[in-house]
Structures are given as C-alpha cells and as structure tokens.
Image: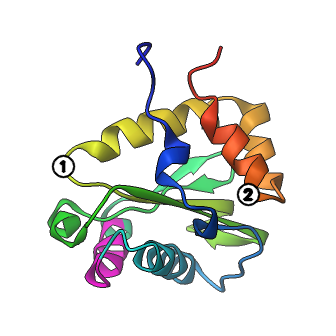
C-alpha cells in the first residue's frame, strides 16, 4: 500500500465520530455502530443484523481496546457505500471479556473492507496511536490519527 494508502478519513463523516457513547453490552455497542452507519446513509438497517451475526461467529475485537464490528458477507447487499464510523466508549464495554473503548464500524462493498481493515490495523499496531485513538476527545484528533496511515 505504499502508492497511497486507503484514506480512511474520506470515508468518515464528522457526524460519524461519536466520542461519548455508552453501551451496556457488546451487542448494544454493535447496534450503536450499526445505527451510525445507517444514519450516514452507508447501509440499510438490515446491515445491523449482519454485524451482530458476524460477532456470533467471530469476535471483531482486535486488541488495544478496539473492536471493528462489520457485517457478514451476506450483509454486503445492504451496503450502499463504503463508510466508517468511530464510537468511543469512555466507560468501556465488556467485549467477551475484553475491555473495549473504541468501536470502528465498517461498511464496504465488494472487497473494500480488506483495504480498510489493513489501514486500520496500521494505526492499531502502533500502541501510541491506539492509545491516542482511545483517548481522542475531538473529531479532529480522530481525523489526524486516521489520515496519516501511510506516514512512517
């Protein structure tokens, strides 16, 4: 991805960055991420069910206090356009025994999710960037973290 990585910020509307969310459970957090994708116009409401279904088969917790909920392959038909949402849970969410502070919801047509996951992984593999994402208090801070995925 050295010839210009996926620009995560192009897929992230400012209204899709929610930094003071609260969820009683993993499934509540997934529903909130799904609702944000619906509000962004990226997916039909049925995509939220596909996100919950994905979580039943394989956890989307990726470490560093971050989960990346996304739909199953069957949910692809519900996707209107590629998009990201970032939800921060200051109180944290129990995600199958893991403490999650940030959920990054993904909607992608075709194989777009692979590039998105790869670019997100680049941020999350850097403990400092992951910590900054967990503590981000403004949309600008989130944009800054996600926009320099090709700078090393």
Is 39 placed left or right of 130 in the picture? Answer: left
Q: Quadrant of residue 21?
A: bottom right
Q: Which of 139 and 48 is in front in this view?
A: 139
Q: Give the range drawn in magenta.
A: 44-54
Instruction: Assess disc 2: are there few (<14), some (14-19) or many (≥20) residues with their C-alpha within 10 Å of its C-alpha.
Output: some
Label 1 Cα crowd, 10 Å radius (few <14 / some 14-19 / many 20+): few
| Residue name at image x 58 percent, y 28 percent | 149
Residue 132: image location, x then y, percent: 80, 43
Quadrant position of the C terminus in the picture: top right
Helix, strand or loop for disc 2: helix
Q: Which residue carries the number 2 mark? A: 139
**Residue for badge 1:** 110
Say which of 36 and 96 sits in front.
36
Residue ID at (44%, 72%): 37
**Residue 53, picture quadrant:** bottom left
Q: Is residue 59 visible?
A: no
Within the magenta stretch, is there residue 45? Answer: yes
Image coordinates of residue 49 in percent, x first then y, are 31, 81
Give the mark toward the camera: 2 or 1: 2
Q: Main secondary structure of the magenta part?
A: helix
- Left or right: 63 with respect to 69? right
Secondary element type, mark 1: loop
In the rendered view, how is the structure colored? rainbow
The answer to whether any part of residue 65 appears in the image is yes
Q: Which of the two labelled residues, at mark 2 and mark 1, occupies the earlier sequence position? A: 1
Does the magenta run of residues contain 126?
no
Q: Residue at x 40, y 19 (%)?
A: 1
User: How far is the residue under mark 2 from the one under mark 1?
Assistant: 28 Å
> Whole-percent x and y of residue 94?
65, 71
């Amino acid at each position: 991805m050295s010839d210009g990585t996926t620009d995560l910020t192009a897929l992230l509307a400012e209204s899709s960055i929610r930094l003071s969310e609260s969820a009683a459970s993993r499934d509540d957090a997934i529903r909130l991420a799904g609702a944000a994708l619906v509000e962004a116009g990226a997916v039909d409401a049925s995509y939220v069910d596909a996100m919950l279904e994905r979580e039943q088969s394989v956890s989307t917790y990726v470490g560093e206090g971050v989960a990346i909920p996304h739909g199953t392959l069957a949910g692809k038909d519900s996707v209107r356009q590629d998009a990201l949402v970032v939800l921060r849970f200051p109180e944290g969410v129990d995600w199958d025994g893991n403490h999650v502070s940030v959920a990054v919801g993904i909607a992608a047509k075709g194989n777009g999710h692979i590039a998105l996951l790869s670019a997100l992984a680049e941020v999350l593999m850097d403990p400092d960037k992951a910590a900054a994402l967990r503590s981000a208090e403004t949309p600008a801070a989130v944009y800054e973290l996600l926009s320099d995925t090709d700078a090393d």
